[in-house]
Amino acid sequence: MNDGLQIYVIWLLIVFKMKKIILLFFTFLGICCCLAQPAKTTDTINGKKDAVSNTPPFKTDSLVAKGKPLLRLYPNPAKNKAEIEIKGFDAGYVIIQLMNNAGKLIREERRLVLTGNEIIIFMFSENPGLYFLFIKQGKIIKKARLVIQ
């Protein structure tokens, strides 16, 4: 094959591969843009057409049982795992902090809460003793004592 033909064939291969890559890029970009849009709902009870953004597209228990935030911790005393039951929180992120009895921060985690009424599994490997567990979300702070065996 002469050089001109080889260059032409290589150029055609590059162009067709680039078309596929560009097509995949724009497809992925379109999917991401569609998923990034906030959910819109309308108020059908009052007949208003107001758009409410950042509401989940599914019915949650937090809308029904919204009240005073509650924190329950079990089993207590625990060995290496505790289940944290929360109620009355908003959907979003909560911060879980574990402090020893001297007030030193031992561990901090940020967890996503979908409904605000959930059970969070909290794993740890701390020395036996008395600890305090804090759950924070915005201005809401709940505290529970945790005894580790």
Image (spheres, rainbow, N blue to C red):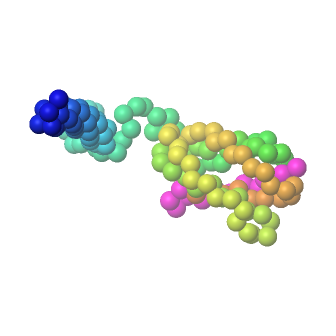
Front in this rendered view, residue 102 or 6: 6
x then y, percent, for residue 90: 49, 47
Q: Is 2 above or below relative to 75?
A: above
The residue range painted magenta reads 137-149
Q: Is residue 120 left or right of residue 1?
A: right
The residue under the point 50% across, 39% down is 115
x then y, percent, for residue 65: 52, 38
Residue 3 lies in what quarter of the image?
A: top left
The residue under the point 78% across, 63% down is 100
Residue 103 lies in what quarter of the image?
A: bottom right
x then y, percent, for residue 107: 69, 59
Residue 90 appears in the rendering: no
Residue 137 appears in the rendering: yes
Q: Is 28 above or below relative to 68?
A: above
The residue under the point 59% across, 43% down is 87
Magenta span dominant secondary structure: strand
Q: Is 47 above or below relative to 148?
A: above
Q: How many marks?
A: 0
| Quadrant (top left/top right/bottom left/bottom right) for the N terminus | top left
Q: Is residue 68 left or right of residue 18?
A: right
Q: Is residue 129 left or right of residue 81?
A: right
The residue under the point 87% across, 55% down is 128
Residue 47 lies in what quarter of the image?
A: top left
Task: Judge whether residue 15 is colored magenta.
Answer: no
